[in-house]
Image: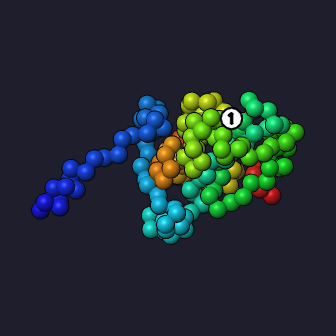
Amino acid sequence: MEEELRMAKKKKEKKTNEERVLDQNNIEYIETSYNWLEKGVLSEANDLGIEVDSILKTIVLQANKDPKDYVVVCLPITKEINLKLVAKQLRKKQLHLADNKKLINITGYVHGANTPIGIHAFKGFPIYFDERTKSFDEVSVSSGKVGRSVRLKLEDLVNLVDGKYIQVEE
């Protein structure tokens, strides 16, 4: 009984700014927490009954070594990105991964917490989605905190962040 009482009093995690953005836009979502480091992505996705490729990673790219020219690409966590192909599609001379050590200054997030929701809302960088994600009705993206995600309709997410689809791998 005492243990049940303690569990009942356990504080619900405070909403992230990104979850508040979703609330303000009347977008339905499910909060999820992942423990990728201990369990691994495949195991965690299987435990939750979701397809692993519907879990998206958010990659921040710097164009033409310009300190003000960044783009964001969201793709399935198990897939790779072809920087030359993406650069060609976006009509950029070249694209490089943004410096992980500077991510907090660039996006406002640490590595592993970048999210298209917050980057769009607070930084205004263009957001692109791997065209292979079109096959999913729902996807998971970070909610601005390492290990914490939101699961929502892909269409709602793409509309919210003014996203566009591109090919990221041949």
Q: In which quarter of the image is the C terminus?
A: bottom right
x and y percentages locating residue 3 in the rendered image: 17, 61
> In this rendering, is residue 119 above or below 167?
above
x and y percentages locating residue 28 in the rendered image: 43, 42
Is 89 in front, or is 142? Answer: 142
Looking at the image, residue 81 sits to the left or right of residue 12; the answer is: right
Q: What element carries label 1?
A: loop
Residue depicted at 19% across the width and 55% down the height:
6
Q: Quadrant of residue 77?
A: bottom right
Q: Name the residue under label 1.
A: 126
Look at label 1 and name its amino acid: Pro
x and y percentages locating residue 139 in the rendered image: 54, 52
Residue depicted at 71% across the width and 43% down the height:
98
Is 84 in front, or is 49? Answer: 84
Is 37 in front, or is 163? Answer: 37
Neighbour tally class for label 1: few under 14, some 14-19, many 20 plus, Cα within 10 Å: some
x and y percentages locating residue 12 in the rendered image: 31, 46
User: Most extreme residue toward the front, as rendered?
Assistant: 101
> In this rendering, is residue 43 above or below 65?
below
